[in-house]
């Protein structure tokens, strides 16, 4: 899931009150309860999970309504914990939700970060701003616990704000600065840190861990393992001590650590294009029923579709009657793109967008990117280039910027119209700009549909010649639509088949390998294991 999901505002549940929270009003919101102050902003945060490195817990307390925390998708429960630095009376908690909201959740408070009591319990959340006032709780740690998701995503909010009054005893002396910060075991996604203890006139209550200058966690001991990191990336760490009154020491001398190239992030994806003819299981020849069973057997972490998801004109009624009965079972973990048949609806793309909802345009366009493990995936709408009606220049500019911003070690792209094909449609020069941009940026894998056959190429360069530095292109228009006749194979074709089937993509942090499974469950083609560029 990565993204900027949008959803319409709905009616608030009776237990919460509506608040319009403008960015300039974040700090000012503390004045809504007399004597209470905003306690949470900039404080250390720990989370049960994050969707990606772009959506860390610190984003929920940074005072900005354009950055957010997002948990891993599709799993309950999830939590986010804020360390206020000292004990306080908690009177109010405000949650400014993004699209991925909670139907049921609790706000909990703890003195020690281990034993929590419930301060508020919400059973009818609807995703608007939740302003929980009149609370009577006390503690140093405040935790949101999501119990039931309101969407197929995880949990995500722009800001979590905690208001109240601290228990400061008048102690104004800060602890000494921690020393001897060192990094121990380092993997692709974690760094183990340790340091020498600080001293304080009353007592050290804990240590803030700063990553790249931002507090990301609090440790009660002199060690901490930072997780959820990006492989092959450099981070700067420092620590500071705090006492019970909230006094902070200066930050320690910083150290620089680089994560390993791989992080053990192996996963499996299923992929196909050209899927649902208007037929059902009542017909023994209905292929999308059979290919859906292949996907189910793979149990993939995510599903990729390469366009022409529904035939013939991709009306919403057809999606509901056919695609939804088979491949629709995997809708919550599908990352789709449209093909030319999605443009044939009375209003182009309407059936596609109405059926897939937010996942059709997770970043506001029919093209977007998302990440899993050490992989960056780019979903493109090649209709822009095939028809020249929907702004190919805009999408191409976005693609170049998205590739420039990428920090992952492996990259895959997918779109409907293949640049190279030995199928009925043949090579598609309209996709030249897409292909050349992907080649120039050393993309590893390109998936296409459009031709109703299977074709795997060896790595190729911009001219379609064999080149180990180019992407592996696979045409996988095998999801269920009537098959096409084949033309003579290209010189760079590794395998060409007229068959139904589903691609199984086995990905690691540094490599990938592909297999085509036929509807009889047999492996019809296996690629070599390719190392990412």
Image (tube, rainbow, N blue to C red):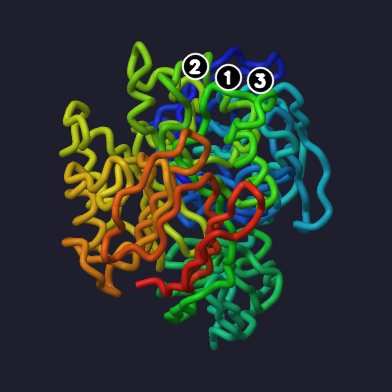
* 172 in relation to 56, above or below: below
Disc 3 crowd, CA 10 A, few/some/many (<14, 14-19, 20+) = some
Residue closest to the eye, 1 or 249: 1
Sooner in the amino-acid sequence: mark 1 or mark 3: 3
* 259 in relation to 289, above or below: below
Per the image, the residue denoted by label 3 is: 16
Place of residue 46 in the rendered image (x, y in percent of width and height, measured from the top left): 63, 56
Q: Nearer the viewer, mark 2 or mark 3?
A: 2
Per the image, the residue denoted by label 1 is: 320
Place of residue 303 in the rendered image (x, y in percent of width and height, measured from the top left): 55, 45
* 123 in relation to 442, above or below: above
Residue closest to the eye, 226 or 253: 226
Q: Secondary structure at mark 3?
A: loop
Asked if one can make out residue 240 in the rendered structure from this viewpoint, the answer is no
Q: Quadrant of the C terminus?
A: bottom left
The Cα atoms of the two marked residues, 1 and 3, are separated by: 35 Å
At horizontal 51% and vertical 75% (from top left) the residue drawn is 262
Q: Can you tell which mark lies on residue 316? A: 2
Q: Secondary structure at mark 2?
A: helix
């Amino acid at each position: 899931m990565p993204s900027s999901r949008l959803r319409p505002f709905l009616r608030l549940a009776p237990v919460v009150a509506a608040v319009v929270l403008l960015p300039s009003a974040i700090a000012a919101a503390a004045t809504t309860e007399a004597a209470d102050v905003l306690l949470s902003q900039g404080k250390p945060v720990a989370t049960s999970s994050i969707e990606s490195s772009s959506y860390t817990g610190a984003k929920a307390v940074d005072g900005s309504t354009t950055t957010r925390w997002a948990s891993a998708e599709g799993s309950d429960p999830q939590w986010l914990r804020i360390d206020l630095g000292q004990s306080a009376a908690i009177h109010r908690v405000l949650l400014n939700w993004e699209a991925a909201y909670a139907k049921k959740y609790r706000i909990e408070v703890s003195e020690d970060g281990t034993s929590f009591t419930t301060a508020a319990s919400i059973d009818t959340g609807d995703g608007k701003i939740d302003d929980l006032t009149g609370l009577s709780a006390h503690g140093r740690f405040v935790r949101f616990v999501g119990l039931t998701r309101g969407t197929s995503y995880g949990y995500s909010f722009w800001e979590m704000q905690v208001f109240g009054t601290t228990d400061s005893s008048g102690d104004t002396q800060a602890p000494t600065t921690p020393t001897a910060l060192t990094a121990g075991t380092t993997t692709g996604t974690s760094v183990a840190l340790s340091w020498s203890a600080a001293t304080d006139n009353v007592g050290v209550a804990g240590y803030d861990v700063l990553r790249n200058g931002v507090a990301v966690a609090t440790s009660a001991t002199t060690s901490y393992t930072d997780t959820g990191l990006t492989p092959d990336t450099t981070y700067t760490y420092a620590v500071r001590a705090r006492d019970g009154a909230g006094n902070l020491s200066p930050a320690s001398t910083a150290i620089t650590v680089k994560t390993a190239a791989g992080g053990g992030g192996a996963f499996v994806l299923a992929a196909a294009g050209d899927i649902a003819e208007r037929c059902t299981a009542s017909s023994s020849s209905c292929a999308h029923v059979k290919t859906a069973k292949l996907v189910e057997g793979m149990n993939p972490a995510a599903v990729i579709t390469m366009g022409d998801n529904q035939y013939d004109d991709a009306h919403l009624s057809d999606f509901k009657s056919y695609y939804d009965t088979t491949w629709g079972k995997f809708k919550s973990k599908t990352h789709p793109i449209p093909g030319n048949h999605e443009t044939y609806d009375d209003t182009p793309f309407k059936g596609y967008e109405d059926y897939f909802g937010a996942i059709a345009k997770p970043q506001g366009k029919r093209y977007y990117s998302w990440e899993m493990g050490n992989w960056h995936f780019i979903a493109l709408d090649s209709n822009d280039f095939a028809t020249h009606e929907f702004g190919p220049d805009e999408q191409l500019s976005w693609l170049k910027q998205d590739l420039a911003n990428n920090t992952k070690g492996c990259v895959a792209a997918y779109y409907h119209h293949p640049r190279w094909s030995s199928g009925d449609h043949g090579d598609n020069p309209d996709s030249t700009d897409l292909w050349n941009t992907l080649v120039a940026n050393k993309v590893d894998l390109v998936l296409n549909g459009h031709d109703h056959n299977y074709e795997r190429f060896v790595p190729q360069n911009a001219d379609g010649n064999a080149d180990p530095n180019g992407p592996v292109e696979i045409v996988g228009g095998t999801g269920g639509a009537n098959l096409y006749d084949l033309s003579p194979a290209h010189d760079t074709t590794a395998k060409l088949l007229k068959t139904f089937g589903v691609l199984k993509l086995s990905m690691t942090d540094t490599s990938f390998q592909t297999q085509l499974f036929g509807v009889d469950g047999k492996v019809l083609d296996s690629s070599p294991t390719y190392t990412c560029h």
